[in-house]
Image (cartoon, rainbow, N blue to C red):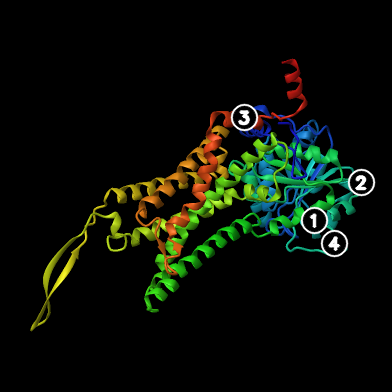
């Protein structure tokens, strides 16, 4: 893969090899200590959160650095960073630069503030490995400058010292602002310093993400600028800090980038809607099967209603969980057949399939939550009285029951056996295996765990073990309701029972998967995924030679 590949109309300045190299550099920066390679171009990173930064104020002061320190810094300007502002974000990004092998000066606009605040700030700054100084000295000592103040403080910056520099604006909005005269924070900064090159970036990274890059090292950083050379240099810095730069285009795109932190779970809305739709559909079917139609057929409208809260809910979430797990693998199967049909991996999938592929992680985590609820309820619900067919046969005895002092009745009493039969043991074992594998799938989907796995390990867990989990979950369903699988229930025996509904998507997925396992089909598909294109010039030349 090239260092710059195209996806969804945006440029992704990344590759797995580049990412691995930079992660390796992140852990060995103190030995290697390479330069960012910005060729002497001065860089400013302007930082704020909303219209403020960190705690909303610029704290701390110092008496500056000595002339010798300043003179020594100038010898290597590309490895020196100045931070204007000592808030939470300013200290976090300072620590990140220090860990990347940089000398960092945090500059305060008021070096003469009270001793109490200065002492506290100096202590916090010292923990980052940076040096506290004044803004003017910090700007004079560094080519890379981080201005950790909000938009309201841009006018009070030493703007004359920012001319001709590369500015990175990392500020966010406190609310979504639109209108014909609206300008993003980055555009406003560019207007204040037209001689500078402003790049929007880093605003999607929190102070926590910057300080814990090992946990969120795969986080994407969106960049926007009217200066391509500046974006390229900033993308190099982003990689060196262990993140993935993504080019969003011109500086006008910064309006959308600044709104990203204000969005509420944008990648979860569609998966939640899909899962809720499945749940609602199944709940309505269960209501008709076990309450409305059942009572209608019996002529008694007072029975079965008490089971809506637990028994119906447990049935429905079990079916929804299996359907959702199947929907994690069906889009990949459809994509494989499209690639086989087209003979190439380079043509885009339909938008609906592309969106479906992107929501698989969220679907999987939602499925894990539903499966967990089903397991918890089943532990309390599963007894010989409720699911007698998975237990050994009960014994029945006749006994005299004393009604009162003068009355006795002879009744048949059932003594239930709490030992599972062979179906019950297989039912319980398959459910336990499926639950265990689903937990493993959920844990390995977390970024902190994914970062520790090789690509082969990750695909083995998510693909191979995922299919085993799907088959185990379907087997769990089959062993539970084997005798009832093809009986029709409710509405005068016209509706299938829940366990039959649960098997529809897994059955479709397995049927679609089997042809792809055949060696000729699998080899051809893997050949396509390695870059082969049917009907390409390379293929034609090979046929001509033959």
Q: Is residue 35 left or right of residue 453?
A: right
Disc 3 target residue: 524
Residue 61, percent from left and from top:
73, 51
Between discs 1 and 2, the one toward the N terminus: 2
User: How far, Cα to Cα, is label 2 from label 3?
Assistant: 55 Å
Residue at the outermost right position: 195
The residue closer to the viewer here, 133 or 81, is: 81
Q: Is residue 294 left or right of residue 276?
A: left
The residue closer to the viewer here, 290 or 62, is: 290
- Residue drawn where x is 52% and y is 49% of the image: 326
Residue at the outermost top position: 545
Alpha-carbon neighbours of circle 2 within 10 Å: few (<14), some, or many (≥20)? some
Label 1 sits on a secondary structure element that is: helix
Q: Which mark is residue 195?
A: 2
Label 2 sits on a secondary structure element that is: loop
Between discs 3 and 1, the one toward the N terminus: 1
User: How far, Cα to Cα, is label 4 from label 3?
Assistant: 53 Å
User: How far, Cα to Cα, is label 3 from label 1?
Assistant: 45 Å
User: How far, Cα to Cα, is label 1 from label 2?
Assistant: 21 Å
1 and 4 marks in contact (CB < 8 Å): yes
Alpha-carbon neighbours of circle 3 within 10 Å: few (<14), some, or many (≥20)? some
Picture quadrant of residue 446:
top right
Disc 1 target residue: 255
Above/below status of 519 relative to 513 = above
Disc 4 target residue: 182
- Residue drawn where x is 67% and y is 36% of the image: 100
Quadrant holding the C terminus: top right
């Amino acid at each position: 893969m090239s260092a710059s590949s195209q996806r969804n109309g945006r440029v992704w300045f990344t590759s797995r090899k580049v990412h691995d190299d930079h992660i390796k550099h992140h852990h060995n920066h103190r030995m290697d200590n390479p330069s960012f390679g910005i060729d002497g171009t001065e860089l400013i990173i302007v930082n704020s959160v909303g219209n403020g930064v960190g705690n909303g104020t610029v704290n701390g002061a110092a008496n500056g650095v000595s002339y010798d320190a300043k003179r020594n810094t100038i010898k290597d300007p590309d490895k020196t960073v100045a931070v204007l502002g000592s808030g939470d974000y300013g200290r976090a990004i300072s620590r990140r630069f220090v860990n990347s092998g940089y000398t960092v000066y945090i500059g305060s606009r008021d070096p003469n503030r009270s001793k109490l605040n200065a002492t506290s700030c100096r202590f916090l700054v010292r923990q980052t490995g940076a040096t506290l100084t004044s803004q003017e000295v910090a700007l004079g000592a560094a080519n890379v400058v981080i201005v950790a103040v909000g938009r309201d403080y841009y006018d009070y910056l030493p703007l004359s010292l920012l001319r001709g520099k590369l500015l990175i604006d990392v500020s966010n909005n406190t609310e979504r602002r639109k209108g014909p005269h609206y300008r993003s924070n980055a555009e406003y900064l560019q207007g204040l310093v037209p001689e500078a090159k402003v790049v929007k970036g880093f605003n999607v990274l929190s102070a926590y993400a910057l300080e814990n890059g090992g946990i969120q090292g795969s986080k994407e950083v969106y960049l926007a600028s009217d200066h391509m050379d500046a974006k390229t240099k900033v993308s190099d810095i982003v990689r060196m800090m262990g993140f993935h730069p993504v080019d969003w285009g011109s500086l006008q795109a910064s309006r959308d980038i600044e709104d990203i932190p204000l969005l509420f779970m944008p990648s979860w809305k569609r998966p939640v809607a899909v899962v809720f739709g499945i749940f609602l559909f199944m709940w309505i079917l269960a209501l008709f099967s076990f309450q409305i139609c059942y009572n209608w057929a019996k002529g008694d409208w007072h029975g079965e209603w008490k089971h809506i809260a637990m028994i119906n809910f447990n049935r429905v979430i079990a079916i929804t969980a299996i359907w959702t797990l199947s929907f994690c693998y069906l889009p990949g199967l459809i994509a494989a057949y499209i690639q086989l049909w087209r003979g190439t991996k380079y043509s885009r999938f339909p938008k609906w399939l592309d969106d479906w592929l992107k929501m698989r992680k969220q679907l999987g985590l939602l499925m894990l939550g539903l499966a967990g609820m089903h397991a918890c309820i089943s532990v309390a619900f599963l007894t010989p009285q409720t699911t007698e067919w998975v237990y050994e046969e009960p014994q029945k005895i006749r006994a005299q029951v004393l009604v009162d002092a003068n009355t006795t009745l002879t009744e048949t009493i059932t003594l239930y056996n709490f030992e599972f039969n062979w179906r019950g043991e297989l039912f319980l074992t398959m459910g336990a295996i499926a639950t265990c594998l689903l937990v493993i799938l959920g844990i390995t989907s977390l970024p902190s765990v994914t970062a520790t796995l090789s690509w082969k390990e990750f695909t083995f867990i998510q693909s191979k073990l995922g299919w085993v989990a799907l088959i185990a979950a379907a087997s769990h369903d089959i062993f539970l309701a084997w005798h009832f699988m093809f009986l029709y229930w409710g509405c005068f025996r016209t509706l299938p029972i829940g366990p039959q509904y649960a098997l529809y998507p897994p059955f479709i997925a397995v049927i679609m998967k089997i042809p792809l396992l055949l060696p000729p089909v699998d080899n051809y598909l893997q050949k396509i995924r390695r870059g082969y294109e049917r009907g390409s010039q390379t293929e034609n030349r090979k046929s001509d030679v033959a």
